[in-house]
Image: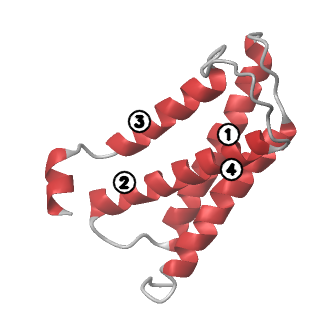
């Protein structure tokens, strides 16, 4: 992991993932339309994965930049930041007028993804972390 700290600037991965999420959620048509029928609810799974992933990379970047296991409040802060970004994106989608709409269920999926990853990280580091 030492090469990672030397070669990749702090918070670079979080910035890239956040940029990808913003593009995918705010662009008019980030992915071309296809004739393949959509699976009902698949977009909610994608939202959960995106914001769970954002929470995960924020925790990873914080861990790499400080070189110590994150405390519970730090992991929780990463999850809350992901949830706030998800809410802001839904508000922006409703306000932009690009044919995208704000959806409370998308926000719920964002929240579930972020909280699930938070729970998994906290459970994994429970015995290593100071209370």
Mark-to-mark CA distance, 2 and 4: 20 Å
Place of residue 123 in the rendered image (x, y in percent of width and height, measured from the top left): 57, 80
114 left or right of 12 in image: right
Q: Name the residue under label 4.
A: 48
Judging depth in this view, the residue of 29 and 124 nearest the camera is 29
Q: Residue 113 sits in which quadrant?
A: bottom right
Place of residue 127 in the rendered image (x, y in percent of width and height, measured from the top left): 47, 89
Mark-to-mark CA distance, 4 and 3: 18 Å
Q: Mark 1 points at which residue?
A: 86
Farthest residue in the top direction?
97
Q: Would residue 107 be visible to someone looking at this image?
A: no
38 left or right of 120 in image: right
Judging depth in this view, the residue of 41 and 79 nearest the camera is 41
Alpha-carbon neighbours of circle 2 within 10 Å: few (<14), some, or many (≥20)?
A: some
Q: Mark 2 points at which residue?
A: 61
CB-based contact (under 8 Å), mark 4 and mark 3: no
């Amino acid at each position: 992991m030492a090469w990672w700290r030397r070669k990749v600037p702090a918070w670079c991965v979080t910035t890239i993932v956040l940029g990808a999420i913003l593009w995918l959620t705010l662009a008019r048509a980030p992915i071309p339309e296809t004739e393949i029928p959509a699976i009902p609810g698949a977009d909610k799974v994608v939202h959960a994965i995106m914001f769970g992933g954002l929470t995960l990379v924020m925790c990873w970047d914080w861990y790499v930049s400080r070189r110590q296991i994150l405390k519970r409040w730090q992991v929780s802060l990463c999850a809350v930041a992901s949830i706030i970004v998800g809410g802001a994106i839904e508000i922006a989608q409703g306000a932009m007028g690009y044919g995208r709409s704000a959806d409370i269920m998308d926000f719920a999926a964002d929240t579930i993804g972020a909280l699930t990853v938070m729970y998994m990280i906290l459970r994994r580091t429970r015995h290593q972390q100071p209370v």
